[in-house]
Image (spheres, rainbow, N blue to C red):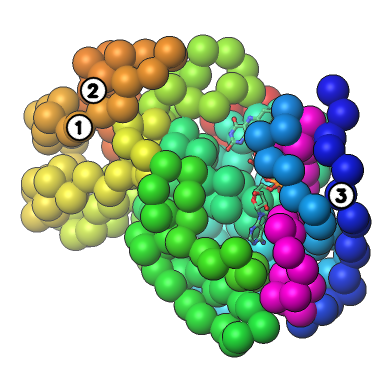
Amino acid sequence: MKPPAFAYHDPGTVEEACTLMATLDNARLLAGGQSMMPMLNMRFVMPDHLVDLGCIPALSAIEERPEGLRIGAMTRQRDLEHSAAVRARCPLLADAIQWVGHRQTRNRGTIGGSLCQLDPAAELPAVCAALDAVLTVQSARGVRTMPFQAFPAGYMTPSLEPDELLTAIELPDWPQGHGHGFVEFARRHGDYAVVLAAALLVVDAAGKITRASLTLGGIGPAPVRVAAVEQALVGQVASSALFRQATEACRALEAMEDVHAPASYRQQLAVVMSRRALDAALASIAQGGRATGAAGH
Ligand SMILES: Cc1cc2nc3c(=O)[nH]c(=O)nc-3n(C[C@H](O)[C@H](O)[C@H](O)COP(=O)(O)OP(=O)(O)OC[C@H]3O[C@@H](n4cnc5c(N)ncnc54)[C@H](O)[C@@H]3O)c2cc1C
Protein backbone atom coordinates (compact mmCIF):
# COMPACT_ATOMS: atom_id res chain seq x y z
CA MET A 1 0.00 0.00 0.00
CA LYS A 2 1.23 3.48 -0.79
CA PRO A 3 0.41 6.75 0.96
CA PRO A 4 -1.44 9.50 -0.91
CA ALA A 5 0.71 12.30 -2.37
CA PHE A 6 1.74 15.00 0.11
CA ALA A 7 4.33 17.76 0.39
CA TYR A 8 7.03 17.00 2.97
CA HIS A 9 8.42 19.67 5.33
CA ASP A 10 11.29 19.25 7.80
CA PRO A 11 11.50 22.36 10.00
CA GLY A 12 14.60 22.76 12.21
CA THR A 13 12.93 24.63 15.08
CA VAL A 14 9.65 24.51 16.98
CA GLU A 15 8.87 28.06 15.79
CA GLU A 16 9.27 27.04 12.14
CA ALA A 17 7.03 24.02 12.72
CA CYS A 18 4.40 26.28 14.35
CA THR A 19 4.51 28.69 11.41
CA LEU A 20 4.05 25.83 8.95
CA MET A 21 1.09 24.45 10.94
CA ALA A 22 -0.46 27.94 11.11
CA THR A 23 -0.15 28.62 7.38
CA LEU A 24 -0.49 25.31 5.52
CA ASP A 25 -3.89 23.87 4.65
CA ASN A 26 -4.64 20.28 5.67
CA ALA A 27 -1.25 19.69 7.33
CA ARG A 28 -0.45 16.85 9.77
CA LEU A 29 2.52 16.33 12.06
CA LEU A 30 4.85 13.36 11.73
CA ALA A 31 6.74 12.12 14.81
CA GLY A 32 8.02 8.51 14.80
CA GLY A 33 5.54 7.48 12.09
CA GLN A 34 4.66 4.19 13.82
CA SER A 35 0.97 5.05 13.75
CA MET A 36 1.01 7.82 11.13
CA MET A 37 2.61 5.78 8.32
CA PRO A 38 0.08 2.92 8.59
CA MET A 39 -2.73 5.49 8.72
CA LEU A 40 -1.36 7.15 5.56
CA ASN A 41 -0.87 3.86 3.78
CA MET A 42 -4.40 2.77 4.62
CA ARG A 43 -5.60 6.25 3.65
CA PHE A 44 -7.30 6.83 6.99
CA VAL A 45 -5.64 10.26 6.82
CA MET A 46 -4.98 12.18 3.58
CA PRO A 47 -2.99 15.31 4.39
CA ASP A 48 -1.72 17.70 1.71
CA HIS A 49 1.32 18.48 3.89
CA LEU A 50 3.32 16.41 6.35
CA VAL A 51 5.41 18.38 8.85
CA ASP A 52 8.18 16.14 10.22
CA LEU A 53 9.28 17.00 13.79
CA GLY A 54 12.29 14.67 13.50
CA CYS A 55 14.80 17.45 12.70
CA ILE A 56 14.10 19.55 15.80
CA PRO A 57 16.75 18.56 18.38
CA ALA A 58 15.17 20.78 21.07
CA LEU A 59 12.20 18.39 21.23
CA SER A 60 14.28 15.34 22.22
CA ALA A 61 15.62 15.61 25.74
CA ILE A 62 15.12 14.04 29.12
CA GLU A 63 15.73 16.81 31.62
CA GLU A 64 16.08 16.22 35.36
CA ARG A 65 14.47 19.03 37.35
CA PRO A 66 14.06 19.36 41.13
CA GLU A 67 10.34 18.57 40.90
CA GLY A 68 10.53 15.77 38.34
CA LEU A 69 11.40 14.86 34.76
CA ARG A 70 10.71 17.05 31.73
CA ILE A 71 10.64 14.98 28.57
CA GLY A 72 10.65 16.44 25.06
CA ALA A 73 7.74 15.21 22.93
CA MET A 74 10.09 13.74 20.28
CA THR A 75 12.04 11.63 22.76
CA ARG A 76 12.14 8.12 21.33
CA GLN A 77 10.55 5.39 23.40
CA ARG A 78 13.81 3.43 23.21
CA ASP A 79 15.68 6.37 24.79
CA LEU A 80 13.19 6.39 27.66
CA GLU A 81 13.77 2.65 28.07
CA HIS A 82 17.53 3.16 28.38
CA SER A 83 17.47 6.31 30.50
CA ALA A 84 19.07 6.07 33.95
CA ALA A 85 17.14 9.20 34.94
CA VAL A 86 13.82 7.54 34.04
CA ARG A 87 14.74 4.39 35.97
CA ALA A 88 15.76 6.39 39.03
CA ARG A 89 13.09 9.09 39.06
CA CYS A 90 10.14 7.43 37.36
CA PRO A 91 10.31 3.63 37.69
CA LEU A 92 6.63 3.30 36.65
CA LEU A 93 7.53 4.69 33.21
CA ALA A 94 10.64 2.50 33.04
CA ASP A 95 8.49 -0.59 33.58
CA ALA A 96 5.60 0.50 31.34
CA ILE A 97 7.76 1.38 28.33
CA GLN A 98 8.80 -2.23 27.91
CA TRP A 99 5.19 -3.13 27.12
CA VAL A 100 4.99 -0.61 24.25
CA GLY A 101 5.05 -2.49 20.94
CA HIS A 102 8.39 -4.01 19.95
CA ARG A 103 12.03 -2.92 20.10
CA GLN A 104 11.77 -1.92 16.42
CA THR A 105 8.70 0.29 16.96
CA ARG A 106 10.22 1.79 20.12
CA ASN A 107 13.33 2.76 18.14
CA ARG A 108 11.21 5.20 16.12
CA GLY A 109 8.08 5.81 18.21
CA THR A 110 8.07 8.87 20.46
CA ILE A 111 6.38 9.68 23.75
CA GLY A 112 4.60 12.67 22.18
CA GLY A 113 3.35 10.63 19.23
CA SER A 114 1.94 8.00 21.56
CA LEU A 115 0.13 10.61 23.68
CA CYS A 116 -1.30 12.38 20.62
CA GLN A 117 -2.36 9.10 19.02
CA LEU A 118 -4.15 8.50 22.36
CA ASP A 119 -5.04 4.88 21.82
CA PRO A 120 -7.32 3.87 24.74
CA ALA A 121 -5.12 0.85 25.52
CA ALA A 122 -1.73 2.55 25.08
CA GLU A 123 0.72 2.41 27.96
CA LEU A 124 2.17 5.93 27.94
CA PRO A 125 -1.11 7.86 28.29
CA ALA A 126 -1.92 5.62 31.30
CA VAL A 127 1.45 6.45 32.88
CA CYS A 128 0.77 10.17 32.37
CA ALA A 129 -2.66 9.82 33.97
CA ALA A 130 -1.21 7.90 36.92
CA LEU A 131 1.47 10.53 37.55
CA ASP A 132 -0.71 13.63 36.95
CA ALA A 133 1.60 14.69 34.12
CA VAL A 134 1.56 18.27 32.85
CA LEU A 135 1.76 18.83 29.10
CA THR A 136 3.19 21.82 27.24
CA VAL A 137 1.62 22.74 23.94
CA GLN A 138 2.84 25.35 21.47
CA SER A 139 1.50 27.08 18.37
CA ALA A 140 2.16 30.33 16.51
CA ARG A 141 -0.37 31.82 18.97
CA GLY A 142 1.74 31.00 22.06
CA VAL A 143 2.52 28.36 24.67
CA ARG A 144 0.06 26.77 27.10
CA THR A 145 0.20 24.00 29.67
CA MET A 146 -2.52 21.58 30.70
CA PRO A 147 -2.89 18.69 33.14
CA PHE A 148 -2.96 15.32 31.38
CA GLN A 149 -6.49 14.76 32.73
CA ALA A 150 -7.68 17.58 30.41
CA PHE A 151 -5.82 16.20 27.36
CA PRO A 152 -8.24 13.51 26.11
CA ALA A 153 -11.17 15.14 24.29
CA GLY A 154 -12.70 11.83 23.20
CA TYR A 155 -11.82 8.51 21.61
CA MET A 156 -8.29 8.83 20.19
CA THR A 157 -8.72 12.60 20.13
CA PRO A 158 -6.41 14.90 22.09
CA SER A 159 -7.63 18.38 22.98
CA LEU A 160 -5.24 20.07 20.58
CA GLU A 161 -6.11 22.63 17.91
CA PRO A 162 -5.04 21.58 14.39
CA ASP A 163 -2.10 24.04 14.50
CA GLU A 164 -0.85 23.01 17.96
CA LEU A 165 2.19 20.84 18.79
CA LEU A 166 2.72 18.92 21.99
CA THR A 167 6.28 19.92 22.94
CA ALA A 168 7.00 18.52 26.42
CA ILE A 169 5.70 16.26 29.16
CA GLU A 170 6.43 16.92 32.84
CA LEU A 171 6.28 13.93 35.15
CA PRO A 172 6.26 15.02 38.82
CA ASP A 173 8.38 12.94 41.20
CA TRP A 174 6.76 10.63 43.71
CA PRO A 175 8.62 10.42 47.04
CA GLN A 176 11.80 8.33 47.19
CA GLY A 177 10.91 4.73 48.08
CA HIS A 178 7.36 4.84 46.72
CA GLY A 179 5.94 1.67 45.23
CA HIS A 180 5.03 1.24 41.58
CA GLY A 181 3.39 -1.55 39.60
CA PHE A 182 2.52 -1.84 35.91
CA VAL A 183 0.75 -4.89 34.49
CA GLU A 184 -1.23 -5.61 31.39
CA PHE A 185 -3.12 -8.35 29.64
CA ALA A 186 -2.54 -8.49 25.88
CA ARG A 187 -3.35 -11.29 23.45
CA ARG A 188 0.17 -11.43 21.99
CA HIS A 189 3.57 -10.07 22.81
CA GLY A 190 3.82 -6.45 21.57
CA ASP A 191 0.06 -5.96 21.13
CA TYR A 192 -1.81 -3.13 22.71
CA ALA A 193 -3.29 -4.17 26.05
CA VAL A 194 -6.83 -5.44 26.34
CA VAL A 195 -6.70 -3.97 29.86
CA LEU A 196 -3.70 -2.53 31.73
CA ALA A 197 -3.24 -1.15 35.22
CA ALA A 198 -0.69 1.26 36.70
CA ALA A 199 -0.40 1.68 40.47
CA LEU A 200 1.62 3.96 42.75
CA LEU A 201 1.73 3.75 46.53
CA VAL A 202 3.33 5.61 49.40
CA VAL A 203 3.39 3.61 52.64
CA ASP A 204 4.51 4.98 56.02
CA ALA A 205 6.71 3.28 58.63
CA ALA A 206 3.63 1.67 60.23
CA GLY A 207 2.64 0.11 56.89
CA LYS A 208 -0.26 2.53 56.30
CA ILE A 209 -0.94 3.84 52.81
CA THR A 210 -0.61 7.64 52.76
CA ARG A 211 -1.01 8.14 49.01
CA ALA A 212 -2.35 5.94 46.19
CA SER A 213 -2.84 6.23 42.45
CA LEU A 214 -4.58 3.59 40.32
CA THR A 215 -5.11 3.96 36.57
CA LEU A 216 -6.72 1.58 34.08
CA GLY A 217 -6.23 1.56 30.33
CA GLY A 218 -8.36 -0.28 27.77
CA ILE A 219 -11.55 0.23 29.78
CA GLY A 220 -12.84 3.53 28.43
CA PRO A 221 -11.93 5.88 25.56
CA ALA A 222 -9.10 7.35 27.69
CA PRO A 223 -7.15 6.19 30.77
CA VAL A 224 -9.33 6.04 33.88
CA ARG A 225 -8.13 7.02 37.36
CA VAL A 226 -10.07 4.86 39.81
CA ALA A 227 -10.71 7.39 42.59
CA ALA A 228 -12.98 5.02 44.53
CA VAL A 229 -10.14 2.52 44.99
CA GLU A 230 -7.53 5.21 45.69
CA GLN A 231 -9.73 6.65 48.47
CA ALA A 232 -10.49 3.23 49.92
CA LEU A 233 -6.76 2.49 50.23
CA VAL A 234 -5.51 5.67 51.90
CA GLY A 235 -5.28 5.29 55.69
CA GLN A 236 -5.37 1.47 55.56
CA VAL A 237 -2.51 -0.92 56.22
CA ALA A 238 -1.24 -2.16 52.85
CA SER A 239 -1.85 -5.85 52.18
CA SER A 240 -2.93 -8.20 49.42
CA ALA A 241 -6.20 -8.82 51.25
CA LEU A 242 -6.94 -5.07 51.28
CA PHE A 243 -6.17 -4.81 47.55
CA ARG A 244 -8.38 -7.80 46.76
CA GLN A 245 -11.28 -6.22 48.62
CA ALA A 246 -10.81 -2.64 47.34
CA THR A 247 -10.34 -3.52 43.66
CA GLU A 248 -13.78 -5.19 43.49
CA ALA A 249 -15.03 -1.62 42.86
CA CYS A 250 -13.46 -1.83 39.37
CA ARG A 251 -16.16 -4.30 38.36
CA ALA A 252 -18.69 -1.46 38.40
CA LEU A 253 -16.73 0.68 35.91
CA GLU A 254 -18.32 1.35 32.55
CA ALA A 255 -16.28 -0.64 30.04
CA MET A 256 -15.87 -0.58 26.26
CA GLU A 257 -16.98 -3.43 24.08
CA ASP A 258 -15.22 -4.24 20.79
CA VAL A 259 -14.02 -7.13 18.60
CA HIS A 260 -11.33 -7.98 21.17
CA ALA A 261 -13.48 -8.35 24.28
CA PRO A 262 -16.97 -7.74 25.68
CA ALA A 263 -17.44 -5.20 28.47
CA SER A 264 -17.93 -7.88 31.17
CA TYR A 265 -14.56 -9.44 30.29
CA ARG A 266 -12.84 -6.06 30.54
CA GLN A 267 -14.51 -5.43 33.93
CA GLN A 268 -13.19 -8.77 35.20
CA LEU A 269 -9.72 -7.91 33.85
CA ALA A 270 -9.93 -4.47 35.49
CA VAL A 271 -10.36 -6.14 38.88
CA VAL A 272 -7.53 -8.63 38.33
CA MET A 273 -5.07 -6.19 36.73
CA SER A 274 -5.69 -3.58 39.45
CA ARG A 275 -5.02 -6.10 42.19
CA ARG A 276 -1.84 -7.32 40.49
CA ALA A 277 -0.58 -3.78 39.92
CA LEU A 278 -1.13 -2.91 43.59
CA ASP A 279 0.54 -6.15 44.72
CA ALA A 280 3.51 -5.30 42.45
CA ALA A 281 3.64 -1.76 43.86
CA LEU A 282 3.80 -3.09 47.42
CA ALA A 283 6.44 -5.66 46.47
CA SER A 284 8.53 -2.95 44.81
CA ILE A 285 8.69 -1.00 48.07
CA ALA A 286 10.34 -4.00 49.69
CA GLN A 287 12.83 -4.04 46.79
CA GLY A 288 13.68 -0.37 47.24
CA GLY A 289 11.25 0.97 44.60
CA ARG A 290 13.45 0.02 41.64
CA ALA A 291 12.14 -0.53 38.10
CA THR A 292 11.70 -4.25 37.51
CA GLY A 293 11.74 -4.49 33.72
CA ALA A 294 8.85 -6.91 34.19
CA ALA A 295 7.70 -7.15 30.55
CA GLY A 296 11.18 -8.23 29.53
CA HIS A 297 10.68 -7.83 25.73
C1 LIG B 1 3.53 -3.20 15.27
C2 LIG B 1 3.20 -2.08 16.21
C3 LIG B 1 2.87 -2.37 17.52
C4 LIG B 1 2.56 -1.34 18.40
N1 LIG B 1 2.22 -1.65 19.69
C5 LIG B 1 1.95 -0.66 20.55
C6 LIG B 1 1.64 -0.94 21.92
O1 LIG B 1 1.63 -2.09 22.37
N2 LIG B 1 1.38 0.10 22.73
C7 LIG B 1 1.40 1.40 22.29
O2 LIG B 1 1.16 2.32 23.07
N3 LIG B 1 1.69 1.70 21.03
C8 LIG B 1 1.97 0.71 20.15
N4 LIG B 1 2.27 1.02 18.85
C9 LIG B 1 2.24 2.44 18.43
C10 LIG B 1 3.56 3.11 18.76
O3 LIG B 1 3.71 3.21 20.15
C11 LIG B 1 3.65 4.53 18.19
O4 LIG B 1 4.92 4.94 18.51
C12 LIG B 1 2.70 5.58 18.70
O5 LIG B 1 1.36 5.23 18.62
C13 LIG B 1 2.81 6.85 17.86
O6 LIG B 1 4.03 7.46 18.08
P1 LIG B 1 4.88 8.00 16.90
O7 LIG B 1 5.98 8.80 17.49
O8 LIG B 1 5.23 6.92 15.97
O9 LIG B 1 3.85 9.07 16.22
P2 LIG B 1 3.29 9.20 14.75
O10 LIG B 1 2.80 7.90 14.25
O11 LIG B 1 4.25 9.94 13.90
O12 LIG B 1 2.06 10.18 15.04
C14 LIG B 1 0.90 9.71 15.69
C15 LIG B 1 -0.16 10.85 15.74
O13 LIG B 1 0.24 11.86 16.66
C16 LIG B 1 0.37 13.14 16.02
N5 LIG B 1 1.54 13.75 16.64
C17 LIG B 1 2.77 13.17 16.77
N6 LIG B 1 3.59 13.98 17.48
C18 LIG B 1 2.86 15.09 17.78
C19 LIG B 1 3.16 16.27 18.53
N7 LIG B 1 4.36 16.46 19.09
N8 LIG B 1 2.20 17.20 18.65
C20 LIG B 1 0.96 17.00 18.10
N9 LIG B 1 0.62 15.91 17.40
C21 LIG B 1 1.57 14.96 17.25
C22 LIG B 1 0.54 12.82 14.54
O14 LIG B 1 0.11 13.88 13.72
C23 LIG B 1 -0.34 11.58 14.40
O15 LIG B 1 -1.69 11.97 14.29
C24 LIG B 1 2.58 0.02 17.96
C25 LIG B 1 2.93 0.32 16.63
C26 LIG B 1 3.24 -0.70 15.76
C27 LIG B 1 3.61 -0.37 14.34
Q: In this rendering, would 7 be left or right of 172?
A: right
Q: Is residue 196 or residue 179 the one in the foreground?
A: 196
How far, Cα to Cα, is label 1 from label 2? 8 Å
Q: Label 3: which residue?
A: 6
Residue occupying image coordinates x 39% and y 26%: 195
The answer, for residue 241, to whether it is visible in the render is: no
Q: Is the residue at mark 3 in contact range of ligand 1, meaning its CB lies under 8 Å from it?
A: no
Q: Amino acid at mark 1?
A: Glu
Which numbered marker is on residue 267? 2
Q: Quadrant of ligand 1?
A: top right
Residue 28 image position (x, y, % from top left): 72, 56
CB within 8 Å, label 2 to label 3: no
Q: Amino acid at mark 3?
A: Phe
Residue neighbourhood size for the residue with mark 2, other residues' Cα within 10 Å, grouped as few (<14), some (14–19), many (≥20): many
Q: Earlier in the sequence, mark 1 or mark 2?
A: 1
Q: Amino acid at mark 2?
A: Gln
**Circle 1: element type:** loop
Question: What residue span does the magenta drawing correspond to?
Answer: 17-41
Q: In this rendering, would 159 be left or right of 102?
A: left
Q: Earlier in the sequence, mark 2 or mark 3?
A: 3
- How many discs mark residues in the rendered view? 3
Q: Is residue 45 or residue 291 the one in the foreground?
A: 45
Q: Quadrant of the N terminus?
A: top right
Residue neighbourhood size for the residue with mark 1, other residues' Cα within 10 Å, grouped as few (<14), some (14–19), many (≥20): few
Q: Is residue 264 above or below residue 58?
A: above
Residue 258 image position (x, y, % from top left): 38, 18
Q: Is the residue at mark 2 in contact range of ligand 1, meaning its CB lies under 8 Å from it?
A: no
Residue neighbourhood size for the residue with mark 3, other residues' Cα within 10 Å, grouped as few (<14), some (14–19), many (≥20): few
Q: Label 1: which residue?
A: 254
